[in-house]
Image (cartoon, coloured by chain):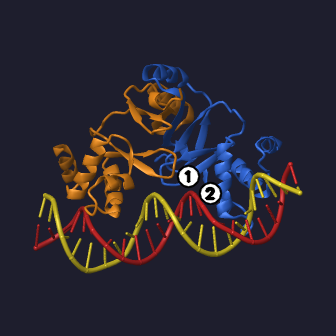
Chain colours: A blue, B orange, C yellow, D red
DNA sequence: ATATGTGCAAAATTTTTGCAATACT
DNA sequence: AGTATTGCAAAAATTTTGCACATAT
C-alpha cells in the first residue's frame, strides 16, 4: 500500500484515513463498486458519502482507480493496481456482475490503423466483454 | 420511418407524436444524445422530459435505440438504423464528443476464444475508441 | 504553519413514479 | 371502446458544493 502514499505525495495530496479505507475496500472486493457500495462496506458512522465521491474523483484523476460504467446510471470504480498497469479488459457476467480481468490486449494494432485513417491523435480505447458466467448459466 | 411504426405495432406499442419527434431528433443529429438534449432540441412546451425518459427506455428495449455511456453520469442514446444493424464501434473525440462510426469489427474471434477459455456463454462486447479529432488538436 | 481534506447539511442534477386526462389503433 | 401513452407535479436517487473544523505533511 506504500505505493499509493508515494503517488499521492508526489501530487501533494494527502494519504488520509478515508482514502486508505476506500482503497482497502476496492482491493478486497475486486468488483467495480459504486460510491454508495464503498460507503456501505465501511463501518457505519465512520465515513461520509460526499468524501467518498470526492476521493474517487481524485483517485480517478491520479489514475489509481478507474471509472467503470455498467450501464445503469451509476458510476463504479475499480482499483488499478499498478501505476501503468499496462492495460487490460474485462469479462463481466450479465447476471451476477462477476468481473474477470483479461490481460491480453490485441486492439493496439487496430488502434494505430484507425488513427492513421481518421486523423485522430492520442488514441485510447475501452473494451468490455459481457456474458453469462458458468454459475449463472441456465441448466 | 415506416419501419419504426411497424416494429412498434408488432409489440402493440403505439406510434405517438412524442416518439416520432424523438426518433427524428436522433436521426438528424447523429451524436449520442441525453434525454435532456433531445428535449431541448424539440419545440419548447411541446415535449415533456418524463415522456422522453420513458420513450427512450422503451425504444432501448425494442432495440431501436442504443444506450451509450460517455463517462459523465448521463445516459445518451443513438438511433439504431436497422433492426439488426450488425455491430460496429465508435471513435469519440475527447474534446468535442464528435462520434465516428467504425464499421469493421475484428473482435469476434477473440470473443470466441475468451468464451472457450472462461466458460462464459452468450458473449457480447463493447469497444470504444477515444482520441482528439483533427479539429481539436493543439497546433 | 499551511495547504489539503473531512463532515455535515443543503443544493443541484438526473431519473422515476402516480394519476387523471389524452391519443392511438 | 379499450389500452397504451402523455403531461404535470411530486418524489427518488445520485452527485455536487459551501463552509467551518480537522488533519497530514
For label 2, the residue is A35
Q: CA distance from mark 2 to mark 1?
A: 8 Å
Chain on which label 1 sits? A
Left or right relative to A58: residue A6: right
Residue B13 seen in render: no
For label 1, the residue is A75
Q: Is residue B18 above or below residue B2?
A: below
Name the spot of residue B102 as percent of width and height, x first: 39, 28
Mark earlier in primary sequence (2, 1): 2
Name the spot of residue A31 as percent of width and height, x first: 62, 48
Label 1: how many Cα within 10 Å (few below 14, some 14–19, many 20+): many
Chain on which label 2 sits? A
Name the residue nearer the viewer: B93 or B10. Answer: B93
Q: Residue at x 83, y 43 (%)?
A: A2
Residue A105 seen in render: yes
Instruction: Give the label on residue B57, or none.
Output: none
Q: Residue at x 50, y 33 (%)?
A: B130
Q: Residue at x 37, y 52 (%)?
A: B37
Name the spot of residue A44 as percent of width and height, x first: 71, 68
Name the spot of residue A39 as percent of width and height, x first: 66, 61
Q: Are marks 2 and 1 in contact (CB under 8 Å)?
A: yes
Task: State the quadrant of the N terminus of chain B.
Answer: top left
Callout 1: SS = strand
Instruction: State how many labels appear.
Output: 2
- Which quarter of the figure has residue A38? bottom right
Name the residue nearer the viewer: B6 or D5. Answer: D5
Callout 2: SS = helix
- Which quarter of the figure has residue C11? bottom right
Name the residue nearer the viewer: B50 or B110. Answer: B50
Say yes or no: labels 2 and 1 on the same chain. yes
Q: Residue at x 37, y 41 (%)?
A: B31
Amino acid at each position: 500500500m506504500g505505493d499509493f502514499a508515494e503517488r499521492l505525495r508526489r501530487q501533494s495530496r494527502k494519504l488520509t484515513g478515508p482514502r486508505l479505507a476506500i482503497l482497502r475496500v476496492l482491493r478486497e472486493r475486486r468488483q467495480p463498486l459504486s460510491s454508495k457500495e464503498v460507503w456501505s462496506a465501511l463501518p457505519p458512522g465512520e465515513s461520509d458519502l460526499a468524501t467518498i465521491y470526492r476521493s474517487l474523483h481524485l483517485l480517478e484523476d491520479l489514475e489509481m482507480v478507474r471509472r467503470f460504467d455498467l450501464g445503469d446510471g451509476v458510476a463504479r470504480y475499480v482499483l488499478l493496481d499498478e501505476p501503468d498497469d499496462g492495460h487490460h479488459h474485462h469479462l463481466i457476467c450479465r447476471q451476477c456482475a462477476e468481473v474477470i480481468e483479461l490481460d491480453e490486449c490485441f486492439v493496439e494494432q487496430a488502434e494505430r490503423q484507425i488513427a492513421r485513417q481518421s486523423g485522430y491523435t492520442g488514441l485510447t480505447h475501452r473494451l468490455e466483454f459481457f456474458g453469462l458466467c458458468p454459475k449463472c448459466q441456465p441448466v
